[in-house]
Amino acid sequence: MRALSPAEECTANAPVDARSPDPFLLPKPGIEGGMTLREALTLRRSIRSYAETPLPLQQLSDLLWAACGVNRESGERTAPYWRHRIVLDLFVLQSAGVSIYDPPTHALAPYMKGDLRALAGQQDFVGRAPLELVYVARGEKMVDITAIERQLYASVDAAFIGQNVYLFCASAGLATVFRGAVDKSRLARALQLPDTDFVTFAQTVGFSDGKPPPP
């Protein structure tokens, strides 16, 4: 694992460049300050109109930690999870490629070259926003339950993380929307997922382009 150069620290796209097989250590997340939970709840909303402006790297680091990062020395996460068993991976889709967030090391592991953001949803804004989060369930970690239960429990865990992302975005002045309108089979093929794994939901993150929501 290597740290980021000063040039890489200027953009959130650099750590997901799949040309390097080495994980990129993200900046230490900022956990001090910010608005109150009640203020963030007041501002929480779904936004479907995005600018193309990339997230600063520090903001990306803070976002991923808030989503499902490690918040205790025991290794537990900011989001709860089913049966104390972590069955989801957080795929990070950006223009430079696809990476997977690794909470224990707070790093991005390069996964695949290519810009797959447009495959992460069926709405017109998908692919324009700088960041698509895709919640992928690892079926081999749930072999002791039925297929229906796998879908249920993985979806609940994805929703826990999604709400964390919502509240962080509200507090950080970012826009986001949690989405189920995804061609999940097509995206799974593009991500070259094994047959045991499946896409649950996706979540768009970026800056609002300032357009008013539709009536």
Image: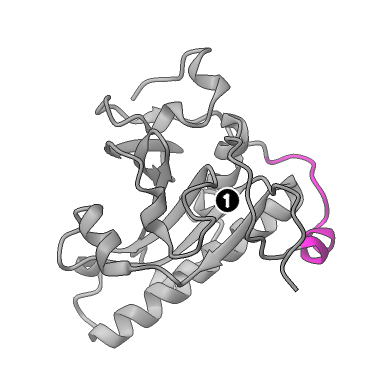
Dot 1 lies on which element? Answer: strand
Vertical comparison of 198 with 190: above or below: below
Where does the magenta region start and end?
Answer: 31-43
| Colour mapping used in the image | one colour
Relative to 200, 59 lies left or right: right
Quarter of the N terminus within the rendering: top left
- Disc 1: CA contacts within 10 A as few (<14), some (14-19) or many (>=20): many
Vertical comparison of 214 with 31: above or below: below
Q: Position of residue 58 (x, y in %)?
A: 61, 31
Residue at 46%, 67% in the rendered image: 158
Q: Position of residue 207 (x, y in %)?
A: 66, 45
Q: Is residue 94 visible?
A: yes
**Closer to the camera in the image, 115 or 136:** 115
| Total numbered labels | 1
Residue at 47%, 13% in the rendered image: 5
Residue at 55%, 65% in the rendered image: 178
**Closer to the camera in the image, 64 or 183:** 183
Quarter of the C terminus within the rendering: bottom right
Vertical comparison of 138 with 127: above or below: below
Q: Position of residue 126 (x, y in %)?
A: 49, 55
Which residue appears farthest toward the left when viewing the image? 195
- Look at label 1 and name its amino acid: Val
Residue at 59%, 36% in the rendered image: 55
Q: Which residue is denoted by mark 1 in the rendering? A: 205
Does the magenta run of residues contain 185?
A: no
Find residue 155 and report its image quarter.
bottom left
Relative to 32, 151 lies left or right: left
Find residue 24 and report its image quarter.
top left
Does the magenta run of residues contain 33?
A: yes
Q: Is residue 74 visible?
A: no
